[in-house]
Image (tube, rainbow, N blue to C red):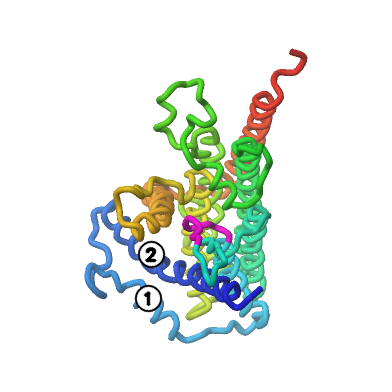
Amino acid sequence: MDLIDFGLIVLRVVATFALLLVVTPLNIWAERKLLADMQNRVGPDRAGPWGILQSFADAFKLFFKEQVMPTKAEKAAFMLAPVFAVVPAFLLFMVVPWGKPITFTVDGVERVLPLQGTDLNVGVLFVLAMSSMAVYAVVLAGWSSGSKYPLLGGVRATAQAISYEAALGLSIVAVVLYSSTAGDSGGGTLSLAGIVERQAGSLETVLPQFGAITQFIPRWNLIPQFVAFVIFVLAAIAETNRAPFDLVEAEQELVGGFHTEYSGSKFLLFFLAEYVNIFSMSALAATLFLGGWNGPTFDSILPGFISAALPTMWLLLKTYVIVFLFIWVRATLPRMRYDQLMTLGWKRLIPGALAWLIVSALVIGIRRFGLPFV
């Protein structure tokens, strides 16, 4: 690895983290404004024009707020739990491709710059690992606080995360299985960049028998895997502890959930992790089901630099469609009871995801090998 390659790696990592740090306060402000509009309120309107600096003001306040350490807390675990919450949230987005790779030449050597933190050939497994790591932060925060209220909140949050993690993983398996037949080579891939590439073009390339109408329909996984998409979105909402699945933070039940005893910058890290996870999960949904950065670039019409930026804009547009869905659900649906939450996860989503995986496998097998005994 030469100095240029090392510099490109550092640039990609810094750009990925910078993107998350920039969009997170803007997402918080957008959610407050959208919720206010949906509930016929004004929303933040004091700090900056249209209240756009309110999120930065809140972060500044929390950062300098007094730090409280409970007397009976396990100090090391208590201080590490917020770090375990925020680090996987950032790392999850590292494998999401947020633009079309750029090819350029330096000293006669052609180089490729992937617009992605890192392109792992096991990217899907890395996503599942990072989303599972958040459970450790929750259970550590609840146990180490030295109070029964955070402990109960941590136990509930852990049970919720494990339940919906299973459904989320099964929905991703269905997409990976389908993507193994979508490529020209017919081989499977666990790389998110590979899954995005296999959604390029239109349905005409895979369904020519349906006529010219298919050339206007994008080749997204959303169409053949719509059931998996619904399961994934529901599981992602529950994974991020968002309404109507925010039982661990229900004030009338558990005071404040697993982070009851946290204040100041440590609470800020939990708050940051939640909103980074919302954006990361939305970007992951756009990557797996909505074609990622695929979209028209109008190369012959627009200037080159605009065409080069359009793939990233397409991904952001698709991501914010899912983010808006998160906000819309929060503004619309009332909080569920805990027994309803667990019933939905174990008796509806997990069996539904398993059934859809079996159906997908049967259909893919018939398409590839034909009907048995025929």
To which residue does mark 1 refer? 58
Quadrant occupied by the C terminus: top right
Assess whether mark 2 and mark 1 are in contact (beta carbons under 8 angstroms).
yes
In front: 1, or 83? 1
Splitting the image into 4 quarters, where does residue 72 fall?
bottom right
Looking at the picture, how far across and down is residue 56, in whole percent?
Answer: 36, 75
Instruction: Report whether 257 appears left or right of 368.
Output: left
Residue at the right extreme of this rendering: 373
Tell me if residue 159 can be seen.
no
Q: Residues within 10 Å of mark 1 (few under 14, many from 20)?
A: few
Looking at the picture, how far across and down is residue 52, in whole percent?
Answer: 29, 69
Residue at the top extreme of this rendering: 374
Quadrant occupied by the N terminus: bottom right
Q: What residue span does the magenta drawing correspond to? A: 95-103
Q: Secondary structure at mark 2?
A: helix
In front: 323, or 203? 203
What's the residue at 53%, 76% (across, down)? 262
Q: Amino acid at mark 2?
A: Ile
To which residue does mark 2 refer? 28
Q: Relative to residue 332, is residue 248 depicted above or below?
A: below
